């Protein structure tokens, strides 16, 4: 084979694999939006859709006050740092945000990352080695799984949300030096809230640490929006919290890890996505500070979010759809059949509602669904219009009477 043939074979192989994805219906197509993110979005084809699939829980992604904050922060701190944190990329605004996040979460200290994916990816390797054990929920987010893979610690996996199996895995890991239980605070496909009180009890009994990923919980759960630990009354009993600035807390991007001072200190020394990747943009840091201030002075947005969630959950059930029960603004509307889930999402799109169909392998076989996500930004008339579209599409496809 000549070099050129070898290169052609590489590209031909990629094209085959891409065709394979298309044939299996697994090829992801991006919808192009020409407006801000919000309760409604304008697509590049000019259509306005009611948006039920953003992680924009508090409706801040397209918020005017935040857009003004960006300009203010840019004026003072500039556009970017052109540096990692430890060379010349740490500004006062980064330290202020780390302090404010630590206070908000009720933790000693915080380290910022460019994304929660990086926070999880760079968490385990500096803290745990081959003498240690990581005990992980089977449905944890991809970034936790990748982060665990990068560490040398022994891996134990427990059945999703199964406390008996968690206990069995803790027993199996009993010979290890340090043990840490890792779980999503909220599982995004089901809206399931981890049984963090029970996890903390088991951790105590077996001498393990607790780590939770709060990407779908920070700003959403708990009386003051601090997250799953507040929701379950276990603030102070969780060792490590990771989370994102890219969902409820403003929606731009950025991630963080919160923990005791010595953990954060070590991550600043050794965590590779922190050491070898650019500083969080100061505009995001400054704007996030304002988001935290807003959340601590008023519960308006969270109240609206939960009122919208309760309203939608009740109304969609009344229509005869099957949903996964719960209280989280993630509302899985179960279609079970993979083809039906895609047809249903497509029909809703034609009727002016943006939702995403999820099917195998993202969710288990026979558990296909459209996932609705509520936002504080939704107005009642928008939810009612969306519900009317669900009713029409449901009747047309024979899903409800
Ligand atoms: C979205 C999400 C992430 C990734 O967050 P980014 O800040 O976008 O990288 C990590 N973990 C969970 C559970 C998530 O839902």
Image: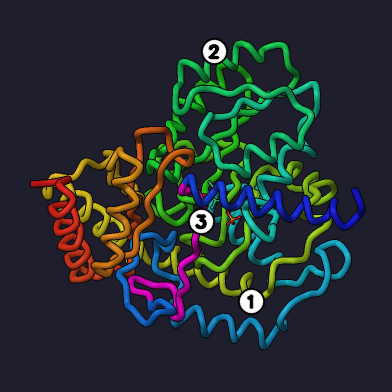
- In the image, residue 276 sits, relative to residue 32, either above or below, namely above
Q: Are marks 2 and 3 in contact (CB under 8 Å)?
A: no
Callout in the foreground (2, 3): 3
**x, y (%) of residue 275?**
83, 55
Work out how far the residue at label 2 is from the one at label 1, CA to CA, in angstroms.
Answer: 46 Å
Residue depicted at 86% across the width and 70% down the height: 88
Region in magenta: 25-41
- 33 within the magenta span: yes
What type of secondary structure mainly makes up the magenta span? loop
Residue where numbered disc 2 is placed:
168
Q: Which scheme is used to colour this image of the protein?
A: rainbow
Which class describes the residues within 10 Å of circle 2: few (<14), some (14-19), or many (20+)?
few
Q: Are marks 1 and 3 in contact (CB under 8 Å)?
A: no
Residue where numbered disc 1 is placed:
283
- Of mark 2 and mark 1, the one earlier in the sequence is 2
Most distant residue in the left direction? 401
- Of mark 1 and mark 3, the one earlier in the sequence is 3
Residue depicted at 12% across the width and 50% down the height: 319
Does the beta carbon of the residue at mark 3 sit less than 8 Å from ligand 1? no
Q: Quadrant of residue 332?
A: top left
- Of mark 2 and mark 3, the one earlier in the sequence is 3
Helix, strand or loop at mark 2: helix
**x, y (%) of residue 260?**
68, 42
Residue 28: assigned label: 3
Between 91 and 331, the residue placed more toward the observer is 331
């Amino acid at each position: 084979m000549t070099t050129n043939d070898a290169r052609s074979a590489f590209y031909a192989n990629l094209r085959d694999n891409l065709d394979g994805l298309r044939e299996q219906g697994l090829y992801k197509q991006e919808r192009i939006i020409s407006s801000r993110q919000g309760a409604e979005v304008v697509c590049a084809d000019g259509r306005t859709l009611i948006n039920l699939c953003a992680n924009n829980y508090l409706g801040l992604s397209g918020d005017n006050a935040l857009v003004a904050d960006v300009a203010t922060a840019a004026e003072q701190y500039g556009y970017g740092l052109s540096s990692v944190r430890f060379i010349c990329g740490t500004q006062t605004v980064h330290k202020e945000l780390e302090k404010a996040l630590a206070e908000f979460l009720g933790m000693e200290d915080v380290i910022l990352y460019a994304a929660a994916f990086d926070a999880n990816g760079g968490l385990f390797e500096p803290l745990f080695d081959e003498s240690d054990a990581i005990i992980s929920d089977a449905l944890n987010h991809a970034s936790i799984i990748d982060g665990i893979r990068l560490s040398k610690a022994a891996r134990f996996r427990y059945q999703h949300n199964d406390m008996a199996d968690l206990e069995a895995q803790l027993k199996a890991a009993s010979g290890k030096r340090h043990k840490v239980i890792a779980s999503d605070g909220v599982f995004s496909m089901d809206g399931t809230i981890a049984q963090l009180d029970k996890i903390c009890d088991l951790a105590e009994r077996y001498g393990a640490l607790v780590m939770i990923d709060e990407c779908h919980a920070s700003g959403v759960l708990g009386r003051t929006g601090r997250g799953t630990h507040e929701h379950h009354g276990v603030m102070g009993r969780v060792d490590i919290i990771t989370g994102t600035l890219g969902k409820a807390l403003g929606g731009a991007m950025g991630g963080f890890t919160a923990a005791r001072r010595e953990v954060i200190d070590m991550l600043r020394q050794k965590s590779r996505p922190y050491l070898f990747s650019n500083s969080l943009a100061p505009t995001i840091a400054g704007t996030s500070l304002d988001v935290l201030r807003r959340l601590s002075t008023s519960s308006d947005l969270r109240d609206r979010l939960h009122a919208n969630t309760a309203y939608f959950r009740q109304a969609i059930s009344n229509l005869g759809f099957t949903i996964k029960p719960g209280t989280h603004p993630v509302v899985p509307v179960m279609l079970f059949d993979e083809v039906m889930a895609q047809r249903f999402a497509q029909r809703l799109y034609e009727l002016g509602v943006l939702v995403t169909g999820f099917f195998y392998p993202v969710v288990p076989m026979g558990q296909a669904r459209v996932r609705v996500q509520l936002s504080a930004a939704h107005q009642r008339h928008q939810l009612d219009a969306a519900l009317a579209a669900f009713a029409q599409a449901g009747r047309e496809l024979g899903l409800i009477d």
